[in-house]
Image (cartoon, coloured by chain):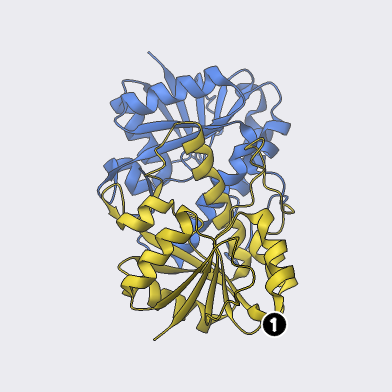
Chain colours: A blue, B yellow
């Protein structure tokens, strides 16, 4: 049995929780009022907006050590929807990895809108979770959980490929915010 | 009747030619042996790899002035498949725009594999061409031609959004090169 802590009770945290529950994992769902409760998962999903990550690391740093940390963020400037807030040659995942050198950080779910995670489909295409990271075992454990939960998983490469995944996430949010696609749609992987 | 010149007779040039033919455009298809023939199209598609663009601009610079120039490139390092060859905060489209200040440069087709352009489908999803650029009229003319040719078109934003489109193209090529997806598949837009 895999223990998963999901920090963040928003629509992404809930959708990911439903997938991992389906996979048979034990889920600990922690909201902003649960800072006194330690995250005990072997896999810890940071299901919060990018600006909230720093505070979680400050608060829960020791709980994250040695764990598989799943970064789902799209570090957009949400005031302008016109740029990312991480350096152009970096990514949220790379930045988080730097501050958590004892953790095994992977990128996942940032190219999936919440409803496509919950429904298992993007239009008529089965939902695929793209996973990037430098720790092969961490990616493999996460992929197993994702597929056991009914979604597809693809290893999208090393941590440096998180930059392209965040480009995809940015474009997808930009298209939905501009009403060019629906928040229930997005990029399907064929 | 729209006149379109397509420079490049590879699988992308041919697929784009078939779409624009369907749309009723007059097509001038120019290969590497046709450098003595002037490109007369109102829309000129540079259907060549990114490293070949510089030579075409040197050779045909005056023919490109005032025209709608369609950049379809993914400026990958094709030796390593591990990085883009343009600056991290820029894009092929932004670089080409700088060298062609009198042209109306748009990004399009770089997120579409050739067979999905020719077939009109990515898996079960109708093929969508994402178009970016600063010239609204140029994007609109190209979108009209794309939709008349049987594909979908979405305005993906200004020239700066070409950076994200090239991230999508890079990831798509990377996944296909790694045999994670088929060259007949890729990202469908839902």
Residue for point 47% across, 27% down: A5
Q: Position of residue B14 (x, y in %)?
A: 43, 60
Q: Position of residue B139 (x, y in %)?
A: 50, 76
Q: Position of residue B182 (x, y in %)?
A: 39, 38
Identify which residue, A102 or B69, lies in the foreground. Answer: B69
Identify which residue, B108 or B10, lies in the foreground. Answer: B10
- Image height of B30 relative to A4, above or below: below
- Image height of A106 relative to B20, above or below: above
- Image height of A35 relative to B135, above or below: above
Location of residue B72 by image quarter: bottom right
Name the quadrant of the N terminus of chain B.
Answer: bottom left
Residue A179 seen anywhere in this rendered image of the structure: no
Identify which residue, B19 or B121, lies in the foreground. Answer: B19
Bin the neighbour count of mark 1 within 10 Å (Cα to Cα): few under 14, some 14-19, many 20 and up. Answer: some
Q: Position of residue A111 (x, y in %)?
A: 46, 46
Q: Is residue B98 left or right of residue A8?
A: right
Chain of the residue that carries numbered disc 1 in the rendered image:
B
Location of residue A185 by image quarter: bottom left
Which structural element holds mark 1?
A: loop
Q: Is residue A88 left or right of residue B10?
A: right
Residue for point 38% across, 57% down: B117
Residue A113 seen anywhere in this rendered image of the structure: yes
Identify which residue, B64 or A94, lies in the foreground. Answer: B64
Residue for point 51% across, 51% down: A169
Name the quadrant of the C terminus of chain B.
Answer: bottom left
Residue under pointer 1: B102
């Amino acid at each position: 049995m895999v223990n998963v802590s999901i920090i963040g009770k928003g629509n992404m945290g809930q959708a990911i929780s439903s997938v991992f529950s389906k996979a048979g994992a034990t889920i600990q769902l922690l909201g902003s009022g649960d800072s006194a409760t330690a995250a005990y998962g072997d896999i810890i999903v940071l299901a919060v907006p990018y600006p909230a990550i720093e505070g979680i690391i400050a608060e829960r740093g020791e709980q994250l050590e040695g764990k598989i940390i799943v970064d789902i963020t799209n570090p957009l400037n949400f005031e302008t929807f016109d740029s990312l807030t991480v350096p152009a040659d970096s990514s949220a995942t790379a930045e988080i990895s730097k501050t958590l050198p004892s953790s095994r950080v992977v990128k996942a779910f940032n190219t999936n809108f919440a409803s496509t995670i919950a429904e298992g489909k993007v239009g008529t295409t089965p939902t695929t979770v793209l996973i990037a990271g430098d720790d092969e075992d961490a990616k493999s454990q996460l992929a197993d959980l994702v597929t056991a939960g009914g979604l597809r998983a693809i290893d999208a490469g090393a941590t440096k490929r998180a930059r392209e995944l965040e480009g995809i996430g940015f474009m997808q949010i930009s298209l939905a915010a501009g009403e060019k696609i629906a928040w229930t749609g997005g990029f399907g992987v064929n």
